[in-house]
Image (cartoon, rainbow, N blue to C red):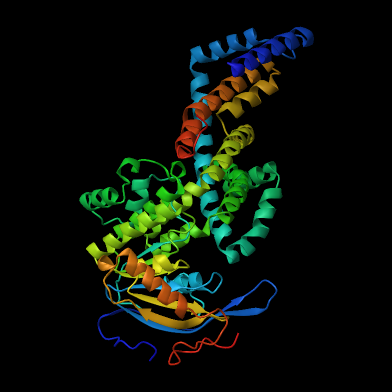
Amino acid sequence: MLRLASLAVFFGAWFLGAQLAGEQYLPGPYAVLTAVATEARTGTLFVQVGITLFRVLLAFLLAMTLGIAAGLLMGRVRLADQLGDPWLIVILNLPALVIIVLAYIWAGLTETAAIAAVAVNKLPNAIVTVREGARALDPTLEEMAQVFAMPRRTVLRHVVLPQLAPYIAAAARSGLALVWKIVLVVELLGRPNGVGYEIGIAFQLFDVTRVLAYSVVFVAAILLIETLVVQPLERRASRWRIRPA
Amino acid sequence: MNDARPAGEYALLEVHIARKVYQVASGKRLEVLRDIRFCLRRGEVAALVGPSGTGKTTMLRIIAGLEPDYQGTIGRPAHSVMGMVFQEPRLLPWRTVEENVRLAASEASDAQLAELFDLLELTAHRSHYPGELSLGLARRVALARALAVEPDLLILDEPFVSLDDALARRLRDELASLIDKRPVTTLLVTHDLDEAVSLADRVFFLSGHPAGIVRECTIDKPRRARGPADLAALRVSLEQAEVPAGRQPTVNPGKQPSGPS
């Protein structure tokens, strides 16, 4: 309820802002929603948003899988941490734009380059978060697993990953937001389709309404994913915690 | 040979810890265990008794294979199965009681588990998470887990500490009847003589710095036959025999000295 009220305030402020700034600089909610409807009718909206979502998903999964594996390794093996840490700091501080441009130069204006560039941008963040989790793993539970000679897979699935779950969830949360922002830049710079490409065209035409139309739809899509996928997963992972009755 | 009994093929556990040294934070080396030797025969229940801080838990950890850095040898038959109850229950908080037991004992059948849960009065708690259990219940789950693997060697590190007396006694009796039902070589660490005399066939006293076994007693009367009077008498005889920490053993001159303190 409170969330809805907060959202209503946001739309109210948007409406007022549009009145003050003029339709050309900040189109009001109605104009933007009309633009959304127009784009939806021709079908381009769904195609472009679908393509971008696909890239987001692929880059996100790639970054998270590699990030969890590398973070776990660096959190548990001192040598891996010592070897990997300088690299991590380099990638962490490399501007997203540099990574994207380099990827396009080295691998061409390809889908692979685009997705890899996005994944590399997200990767260090995932590694750092999961590494913190791996450092905080409870050694007493691992001893228990060792005494009972649990197979490695069982240990990973039932002892290690549940302890990492909050860290993975945190990385996923910030990751989803980061990845979709970078995917748009990648699309703007070197892809012939997707929301980023559309926004690039709109920018050249100074079509603020279209920029906002695509943004709104995309934010809505990400919110939906967050509510329908991320949050239920998180609830499931923390169902063992005692909640105040 | 420290142990009077022949090791032979019936020995399930042969322990020889020549030295165990810890490096403390200041860089100093602290010797905690020296010259510990004993053998347990199959089905024998031994209790390790001694004041806290003598390295009893360290010794169990060495025997359980959790402390690879020591001098000596631990002999166990190949493929022997170990079950352990730690001082804390060490349950996986994100798995239910039943899952906790099943994950350790993947080969236990439904019927076996049902019987075990029934015996330890855990049936009603099978689908609870450890966070929803009292400490007493959690300890019972830990015990169920250790027994569910049908261990050849059962290691118990003060399994009933910090429980109230009545509950501790009840769990102790449950454990005794379980061990009698299916004999299992058991090594129990405790600082409670009552616990030692009601469960063990043999009692080892650990003392000194570095600690060694300063005395060993055998209780010949079977567990089931020990009445309250027997327990009290045993306790008194053990108390009289107990060697104050840090002294050279005087009761059993034939035993390995615990080393100067």
Q: In this image, A225 relative to B7: left or right?
A: right
Q: Nearer the viewer, residue B63 or A182?
A: B63
For the point 49% across and 37% down, the residue is A242
Which residue is more in the foreground, B91 or A187? Answer: B91
Residue B127 higher or lower than A17, as above or below: below
Residue A81, position in %: x, y?
61, 61
Q: Is residue A23 visible?
A: no
Q: Is residue A144 visible?
A: yes
Q: Which quadrant would the C terminus of chain B be assigned to in this image?
A: bottom right
The x, y position of residue B112, in whole percent, is 23, 53
* Foreground pick, B140 / B251: B251
Instruction: Describe residue B155's horizontal placement relative to residue B212 as left or right.
Output: left
- Looking at this rendering, what residue extends furthest in the right direction? A20
Point out residue A88 in the picture as x, y percentages from the top left corner.
Answer: 65, 54
User: Could you tell me which residue is drawn at 45 percent across and 71 percent down?
Assistant: B60
Q: Nearer the viewer, residue A36 or B52?
A: B52
Q: Is residue A60 above or below residue B78?
A: above
Q: Quadrant of residue A182?
A: top right
Instruction: Tell me the quarter of the image containing the N terminus of chain B.
Output: bottom left
Residue A116: % across, % down: 56, 45
Q: Is residue A175 left or right of residue A150?
A: right
Name the residue at 46% across, 62% down.
A143
Q: Residue furthest left?
A: B111
Q: Is residue A181 above or below residue B253?
A: above
Q: How many marks?
A: 0
Where is B57 relative to A108, above or below?
A: below
Q: On the picture, is A192 further left or further right than A25?
A: left
